[in-house]
Amino acid sequence: MEIAIIAHDGKKAEMVQFLNQHSDILQQKSITLISTGTTGEKVNKAGLEVHALLSGPLGGDAQIAARVAEGKCNMVLFFRDPLDRHPHEPDILMLMRLCDVHNVPLATNPATAELLIKAI
């Protein structure tokens, strides 16, 4: 199972905390974590293994969207900051749309992510 990890700048610390709380589940051999670049750096520094792609504004969101469309990514945890503007908003919307098109679970906040992680 491949799980994508994405967090806007104002949510990165919250994402790292969430992942640490659920590391027992996320470190199973059957789970692979991928992420956008900067989020991946923070997660790796916290001690969890994640394969980082490009930074979101540089195409990382689009890379994850492509993995969703190809059937490679099975779940997306995307802690969005709804109160901030993002120059790569079209990529974000594309990722969210592709999750819907391909029926891939998408959590955009910790409460929903908690439910998805417990379902693994």
Image: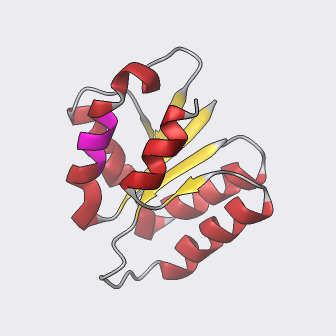
Give the left or right position of residue 87, taking residue 89 as reference.
Answer: left
Q: Position of residue 37 (x, y in %)?
A: 38, 51
Foreground of the two, 50 or 110: 110
Location of residue 49 with respect to 15 vertically, above or below = above
Foreground of the two, 88 or 20: 20
Q: Residue at x 37, y 78 (%)?
A: 82
Q: How is the image coloured?
A: secondary structure
Location of residue 86 with respect to 64 vertically, above or below = below
Q: Position of residue 26 (x, y in %)?
A: 44, 26
Magenta stretch: dominant secondary structure: helix
Q: Quadrant of the N terminus?
A: top right
Q: Residue at x 27, y 60 (%)?
A: 11
Give the left or right position of residue 26, taking residue 76 as reference.
Answer: left
Is residue 36 something one can see in this rendering? no
Location of residue 88 with respect to 117 vertically, above or below = below
Question: Residue pushed farthest top?
Answer: 29
Location of residue 16 with respect to 100 vertically, above or below = above
Q: Position of residue 35 (x, y in %)?
A: 45, 46
Q: Residue at x 44, y 23 (%)?
A: 25
Is residue 48 something one can see in this rendering? yes
Q: Position of residue 120 (x, y in %)?
A: 58, 29
Query: Residue 1 colored magenta?
Result: no
Give the left or right position of residue 15, taking residue 105 as reference.
Answer: left
The magenta segment: 15-19
Q: How many marks?
A: 0
